[in-house]
């Protein structure tokens, strides 16, 4: 029912797969770019053909909420990039998170989550608890024991974000997958921060990978979208229940934008990482900066895990300044090239203050526990010249040193 099943060519190298997988120009009058099938429905040649399509006896499209050729090309591409049997597209990252969690749980179940999750995922978990008695626990997932203590008979899935937003702490995916397998519990990984170019959770033994494609996969800050990949049977179940019947599908035009953005994913990610590594080194030497959190930092606590499961450290950095919430806001206000905005993974360098923006909905005590203090700042390093990014950041940090209110010393 999900459309035409064809065996398309497989590509071993990701740089080639992002451009060619899921699409064959020969099937579309030679069109180099994937055509946008801007149609709600598909006509049947006969009543009998309609019957066969609905019965699943004949491949072919029916109605765009059940499958669309442009969206299908994107679904095949994400599957290939993540090393999965099947892929699925959603109207937003949150549509992917909610459809997957709803498909895996029922009333009375329990979800075990990484210590930090995306703000709206946190909101969804609370909603599921209030409305459907699906409870959750947060776990640092650093050791086998920590996981074993919190897994219950009702635990229906393990939900992991790594790197964790916005503290950039890492979770060892192989370790989590090993324990989960022992208990027969599926592991879902939100891979938004890394993209398939830097990290492929299914290869570490996890079961479903999801993305806010709004971020690195789209890469140009012009679309809200979600993607998932995993085993054919599980993806098919989600497609035919909590995607089809709840209805958070992706539009053909958004799929086209993503197919276009994805072609440069490896090239962009390499530059994001190169720029971020440079900014990290500069930040570490600035006296207004107290601490820098970056997975690719060889002196950081998670460097071993990063080397095991990530190709490079990524484009996101968070850092704590010597100062208060007011100092953090002053810093943001003094920037000009760097834009104050939530979201990440765009060509433009974006900066935000998690305590008052993305994580303002988390109760203060919980927020501090999660490592999100008032002096924490998150930077999504863009594709501009790294010297220009640093110049903007440096003049704003320098001014922090000059303000009348004395900033606490590094030791404080
Ligand atoms: C943005 C984001 C989401 C939500 O995605 P939307 O496309 O905004 O719905 C989920 N997880 C992470 C880690 C994100 O950064």
Image (cartoon, rainbow, N blue to C red):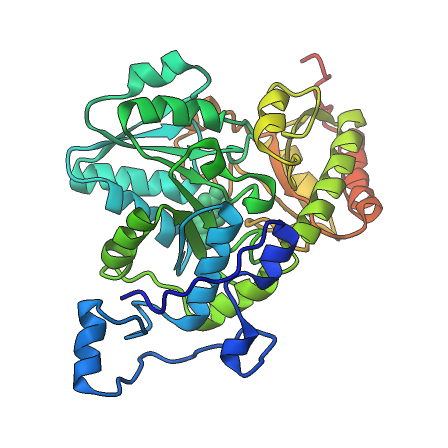
State the count of labels: 0
Q: Given the current orientation, which residue lies at the most extreme bottom position?
A: 45
Q: Residue at x 69, y 52 (%)?
A: 268
* Left or right side of 54 for 313: right
Screen quadrant of the N terminus = bottom left
- Relative to the observer, which residue lies in front, 14 or 315? 14
Query: Picture coordinates of residue 258 (x, y %)?
Result: 54, 63
Residue 130: tell me if it is visible.
yes
Q: In the displayed structure, would residue 104 be above or below residue 157? A: below
Q: Is residue 220 visible?
A: no
- Figure check: 32 above or below 311: below
Q: Is residue 387 left or right of residue 322?
A: right
Residue 12 at x, y = what percent? 59, 49
Residue 374, located in which quarter of the rendered image?
A: top right
| Nearer to me, 80 or 325 | 80
Closer to us: 32 or 340: 32
Q: Quadrant of residue 321?
A: top right
The image quadrant where one finds the C terminus is top right
The quadrant holding residue 87 is: bottom left
Tell me the residue at 49%/42% (across/down).
191
Describe residue 155's horizontal placement relative to residue 365 as left or right: left
Q: Position of residue 45 (x, y in %)?
A: 26, 87
The residue positioned 32% from the left and 74% from the top of the image is: 61
């Amino acid at each position: 029912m999900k459309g035409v099943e064809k065996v398309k060519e497989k590509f071993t190298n990701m740089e080639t797969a992002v451009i060619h997988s899921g699409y064959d120009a020969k099937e579309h009058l030679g069109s180099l770019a994937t055509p946008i099938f801007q149609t709600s429905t598909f006509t049947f040649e006969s009543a009998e053909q309609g019957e066969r399509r609905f019965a699943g006896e004949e491949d072919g499209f029916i109605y765009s909420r059940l499958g669309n050729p442009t969206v299908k090309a994107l679904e095949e591409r994400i599957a290939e990039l993540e090393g999965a049997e099947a892929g699925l597209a959603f109207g937003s990252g949150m549509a992917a998170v909610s459809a997957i969690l709803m498909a895996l749980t029922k009333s009375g179940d329990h979800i075990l989550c990484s210590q930090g999750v995306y703000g709206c995922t946190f909101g969804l978990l609370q909603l599921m608890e209030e409305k459907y008695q699906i409870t959750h626990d947060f776990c640092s997932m650093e050791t086998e024991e920590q996981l074993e203590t919190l897994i219950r008979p009702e635990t229906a899935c393990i939900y992991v974000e790594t790197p964790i937003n916005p503290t950039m702490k890492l979770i060892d995916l192989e370790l989590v997958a090993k324990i989960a397998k022992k208990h027969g519990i599926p592991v879902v990984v939100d891979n938004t921060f890394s993209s398939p170019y830097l990290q492929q959770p299914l290869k570490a033994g996890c079961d479903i990978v999801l993305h806010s494609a709004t971020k690195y996969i789209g890469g140009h800050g012009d679309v809200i979208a979600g993607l998932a990949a995993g085993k054919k049977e599980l993806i098919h179940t989600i497609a035919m229940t909590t995607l089809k019947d709840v209805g958070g599908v992706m539009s053909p035009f958004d799929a086209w934008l993503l197919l276009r953005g994805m072609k440069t994913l490896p090239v962009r990610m390499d530059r994001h990482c190169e720029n971020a590594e440079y900014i990290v080194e500069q930040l570490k030497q600035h006296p207004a900066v107290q601490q820098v959190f970056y997975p690719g930092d060889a002196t950081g606590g998670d460097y071993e895990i990063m080397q095991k499961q990530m190709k490079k450290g990524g484009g996101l950095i968070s850092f704590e300044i010597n100062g208060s919430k007011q100092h953090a806001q002053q810093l943001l206000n003094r920037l000009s090239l760097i834009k104050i905005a939530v979201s990440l993974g765009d060509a433009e360098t974006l900066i935000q203050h998690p305590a008052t923006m993305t994580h303002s909905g988390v109760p203060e005590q919980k927020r501090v526990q999660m490592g999100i203090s008032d002096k924490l700042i998150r930077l999504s390093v863009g594709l501009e010249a790294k010297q220009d990014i640093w110049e903007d950041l440096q003049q704003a940090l320098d001014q922090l040193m000059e303000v009348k209110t004395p900033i606490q010393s590094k030791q404080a």
